[in-house]
Image (cartoon, rainbow, N blue to C red):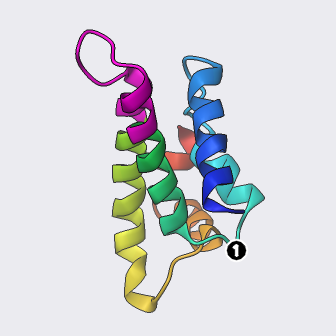
Amino acid sequence: MEDEQIKETVLVALHATPDGYRTLVRDIAAAHPDMAARALEAALLAAARDMDGEIQRDGGPTNEARTARRLALLLSMDIDRLERDGEVSMADLMAYWTKRDDFFLRL
């Protein structure tokens, strides 16, 4: 999956419903297990920047942009835990979530 496609998937999910973010990370992980986890982190941050640039509500970031940044931060924490052994794939994260920290599976 290309970077721009990942970002578009993120944007669609965040705008689809108020809780569209809940399954976003695990759905992408399940659908694209070989994708580098940092690619999703970058897509979340890029989506947040795009949303901030297009729609400013009350002079601040949109709720969707804040959500994208929060997901990116939480995702990066999991990636950092696993990165000692080299690049982390979405499959690596799914295994980690299944065995150790199921936050993204429960979200």
Q: Report the number of discs.
A: 1
* Mark 1 neighbour class, 10 Å CA radius: few under 14, some 14 to 19, many 20 or more: some
Q: Is residue 81 left or right of residue 27?
A: left
Who is closer to the viewer here, 52 or 100? 52
Q: Is residue 85 above or below residue 16?
A: below
Q: Is residue 94 above or below residue 89?
A: above
Which residue of the protein is positioned furthest toward the left in this rendering?
Answer: 59
Quarter holding the N terminus? Answer: bottom right
Who is closer to the viewer here, 87 or 6? 6
Which residue appears at 53% of the width and 37% of the height? 107
Residue pointed to by mark 1: 34
Which residue of the protein is positioned furthest toward the right in this rendering?
Answer: 31
The answer, for residue 52, to whether it is visible in the render is: yes
Q: Is residue 1 magenta?
A: no
Which residue appears at 65% of the width and 58% of the height? 29
Percent position of residue 85, x then y: 44, 90
Which residue of the protein is positioned furthest toward the front in this rendering?
Answer: 54
Q: Is residue 57 magenta?
A: yes
Which residue appears at 62% of the width and 18% of the height? 17
Q: Is residue 76 left or right of residue 24?
A: left
Which residue appears at 55% of the width and 33% of the height? 21
Who is closer to the viewer here, 23 or 58? 58
Q: Which residues are magenta?
A: 49-67
Q: Amino acid at mark 1?
A: Asp
Percent position of residue 44, x then y: 47, 47
Who is closer to the viewer here, 102 or 104? 104
